[in-house]
Amino acid sequence: MVIGRAPFSEDELAVLATHMQEIVAANEPIRKVRVPLEEARAYFREQRADDKLRLLEFRDKDYLVLYTLRGQRDYYYGYMVPSTGYLTTFSLQPYSNGFVLRYPRRENPGVIYPEGESPKLATVFEQSAEWLDLLGIEDIGQLNQAIKAGRARELVLVAEALHEQRVASIAMEVARLHREQCVRLVLIAGPSSSGKTTFSKRLAVQLMAQGLKPYPLALDNYFVDREKTPRDANGDFDFEALHALDLDLFNAQLFDLMEGREVQLPRFNFISGRREPGEVVQLSAAHVLLLEGIHGMNPALVRDLPGSCTYRVYVSALTQLNIDRHNRVPTTDLRLLRRIVRDARTRGYSAVDTLARWPSVREGEKRYIFPYQEHADVMFNSALVYELAVLRPLAEPLLLQVGATSPHYIEAKRLLSFLRWVLPLDGDLIPDNSLLREFVGGSILRDYMPGEGSAPK
C-alpha cells in the first residue's frame, strides 16, 4: 500500500509486471554473502533502514548473511532461489491504494489459486496495526527494545486488556441482538491453534456479565455412525467433511432447544463409532447456545434456521508484528509454533510429529474454513504482540531436536531463523485467563465449562 497516492491503474500494474517479467527472463543470479556485523550495520545505516538497525541491535553473532541482486543488498531470514529465472509465476492485483503481489503455494509452485475479496479480514489487519501503533511496537526490533527497557509487564497487560475489550464488545453485541432479534446461537470457527476454545470460554464469561446464560453444544456428538462417514480421495474416513455430521438431527434439535423444548442430546461414542443417548436439556429464554467447530462459518451447517437467530465469530491469529519491513512473519507460522508447543506439552509429540501433520491440517483449513471466513459477523484477532517472545524458549529446544536427515529439517531451520531474532520472555507474566495459556499451559479456563449445570433437567 502506498500512502498519499491514487490507486494503481491497470496500465501502471501492467508496466510494472512487464518489468518484473524482464528481470525473470534475464535469469539474474541471487547471491548469498556473509558479511561482518559492523559492515551490515554500516550499510543499513547508509540506507536509513531503521527497522534493520533495531533488529541488529540484538544480534548475538558477529556476522550477517545478506542476499544481493542487481546491485541491491538485503537480509531475508528464509531461503532464496538461486536466480530470478525461478520466479516465473506471479500476478499483480489492485488493492486499495496499492496492489497485492500473488504467487503460488509451496505445494503447487506452478499455479496461482484464485482469491476472493476479504474486506472483513482486511479490517481486522487494520485494527491489528492500530493496536501495534497504540503499543508503540512496529516490528520485532521494537519489541526487543521494549523487553530490554523493562516494559514487558506493561506490554502484556495492555495487550491482554485490548483482547478483553474486544471480547466484551462482541458479548455486548450478542446481548443486543439477543434482545432485539432473538439471537440464540453463537457459532465460533477458525483455523487450527487460533485459540477458539479459550475465546469461547472468555466470551461465555462476558455473556454472563451481560445477563445471558451461555450453554456450549458439542458438535462432535452429532457425528453420523462411522460406517456412514464420507470418505476422502484415498478411501479413508473424512471426519472433517460437513456430511460427517447428522445435519438433519442437529438442525431439528437446535430448533427445539431455541423454542424451549426438552431435548435429549446425543453423545458420540468414539470407541464404538456410534451415537448414544446423552443428557436431557431444556433452555430458558435467557440461554444462548455456543457452538465451536470448523464448519461454524458454513451456512449449510444451520441450513434450517433463520439467519436472524445466529451470530458467527471467526477467530484467527493475524499477527502484524514482522521482523522488519521486508521480512513478514506469516500468520500460519505463529499458529504452527503455538501448536508445536501445545502438542509437546499435552500429547508428548515431537516437533517432527507436528510438522509432519501440519500439511494435512492446512489442507483441511483450505477446504472447510477459509472459503467461508467472510460469512462471519465479526472477526477476533487472537494474536498477542508479545507472544513470540514467550513461545521462543518453549519452541526453540523442540525445533533444535529436528535432525539434519529429517524431511522437516529445512522447515525447522526456517522457523528457528526468525524465532532467534526475538528476545525470550518469562511466561510467568502471562495472566492465567490469557488466550496464550491454551498453548503454554496454566490456564484457569482449562477445566471451566460455561453454564455448567444451568440447563440440563
Image (cartoon, rainbow, N blue to C red):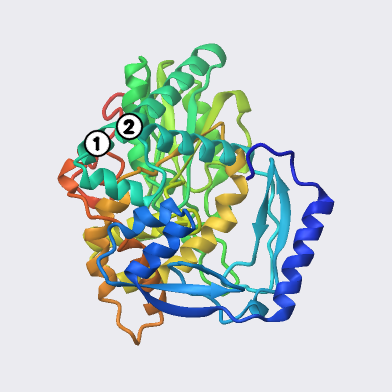
Q: Cβ–Cβ below 8 Å for labels 1 and 2?
A: yes
Q: Which residue is identified by label 1?
A: 433
Secondary structure at badge 2 equals helix
In percent of the image, x 48 and y 20: which residue is there? 173
Percent x, y of residue 92: 72, 57
Give the numbered dot on residue 18.
none
Q: Residues within 10 Å of mark 1 (few under 14, many from 20)?
A: some
Task: Examine the rendered structure and indicate whether residue 108 appears above or below residue 142.
Answer: below
Whole-Å distance between the Cαs marked 1 and 2? 8 Å
Give the numbered dot on residue 202.
2
Percent x, y of residue 258: 49, 24
In percent of the image, x 45 and y 67: which residue is there? 75
Q: Look at label 1 and name its amino acid.
A: Asn
Percent x, y of residue 214: 37, 26
Percent x, y of residue 392: 26, 58
Is residue 331 something that shows in the picture? yes
